[in-house]
Image (spheres, grey):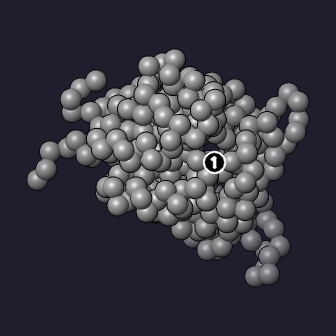
Amino acid sequence: MSVHSVKAAILGTGNIGTDLMFKLLKNPGHLELALVAGIDRASDGLARARSLGVATSDRGLEAVLATPDIKIVFDATSAHAHCRHAPALAVAGRIAIDLTPAACGPYVVPPVNLRAHVDAPNVNLITCGGQATIPLVQAVSRITPVRYAEIVSTVASVSAGPGTRRNIDEFTFTTARGLEALGGAHSAKAIIILNPADPPILMRNTIYVIPAGDFDEAAVADSVAQMAAEVQSYVPGYRLKGAPVFDTVATAAGPRRMATLLLEVAGAGDYLPKYAGNLDIMTASACRVARVITEHLRAPGP
């Protein structure tokens, strides 16, 4: 690894932290994974890291803070834990990339607003549903104002570990706020469904968008396709199931045209099964964010 690399740590050794580790090691660029830290000495994540020659610790945040040359910290724990971690990381001058719905820092979705937050000390990746659907709602809102957006994210029950299940309330709140703040919707709602089907299903998202007035359906369809291609550049398993479907629905303000978008996300299979696209989109987004921040840190000053 180059002496000019930026050192990083993963905090959390569950499914998301471990999958992230495999992604970073597969294509490190100028980012060096210097530490994987958790609190469960017997976790598979720590065992995998040791087998790959990555430094590990079961002292969690304490170990991260005790390693002074680490600049970027991926927090793959839980929303409640990150709320405790964030102040300590900020005092220590570490950049936090938060993969939980804690929302201690600005919401970031790579193709939507990453460049605006490369100097932020803490960036929040919202939720898997947010990473999947916010880009497409934003693709509509850049063509026409969006009055209302609603998303339903359906994921395989077996892909939702203890952390995801503890964060269900945060998921619905944070995703809806992200649809408004980044997606551009005036109001929004988010729903998550854990599907127990066997064999497990891929992550599927249904997105309903009601614009505020008349709009150019062809322009919306083109914008959505362009945005999907941008996301697919770093999440290869991200794909629209077809072109947007336009229909007329009754609302309190009278009949409105509505766009329905159907989206599927398959995982890359780095550590987790391919059906776990909901987790894969989080780790792939974290990698994209880290690499852009790393290049920004390495760029020569003015």
> 94 or 232: nearer the eye?
94
Q: Position of residue 128 (x, y in %)?
A: 63, 48
Label 1 Cα crowd, 10 Å radius (few <14 / some 14-19 / many 20+): many
**Which corner quadrant of the image does residue 211 belong to?**
bottom right
Tell me where residue 233 appears, x and y as whole percent.
49, 35
Q: Position of residue 86 (x, y in %)?
A: 46, 59
The residue at 50%/22% (across/down) is 50
Q: Quadrant of residue 180?
A: bottom right
Q: Nearer the viewer, residue 282 or 147?
A: 282
Q: Is residue 301 left or right of residue 49?
A: left
- Asked if residue 245 lies left or right of residue 10, the reply is right
Q: Residue at x 27, y 33 (%)?
A: 5
The number of numbered badges drawn on the structure is: 1
Residue 47 in view in this figure = yes
Q: Amino acid at mark 1?
A: Cys
Tell me the residue that label 1 is attached to. 128
Secondary structure found at label 1: helix
The N terminus - image quarter? top left
- Residue 251 drawn above or below residue 234: below
Residue 221 in view (yes/no) = no
Rendered residue at 61%/59% (across/down) = 80
Q: Is residue 214 above or below residue 282?
A: below
Residue 152 in which image quadrant: bottom right
| Residue drawn at 28 percent across, 41 percent down | 69
Residue 182: image location, x then y, percent: 52, 63
Residue 194 sits above or below residue 236 on the image: below
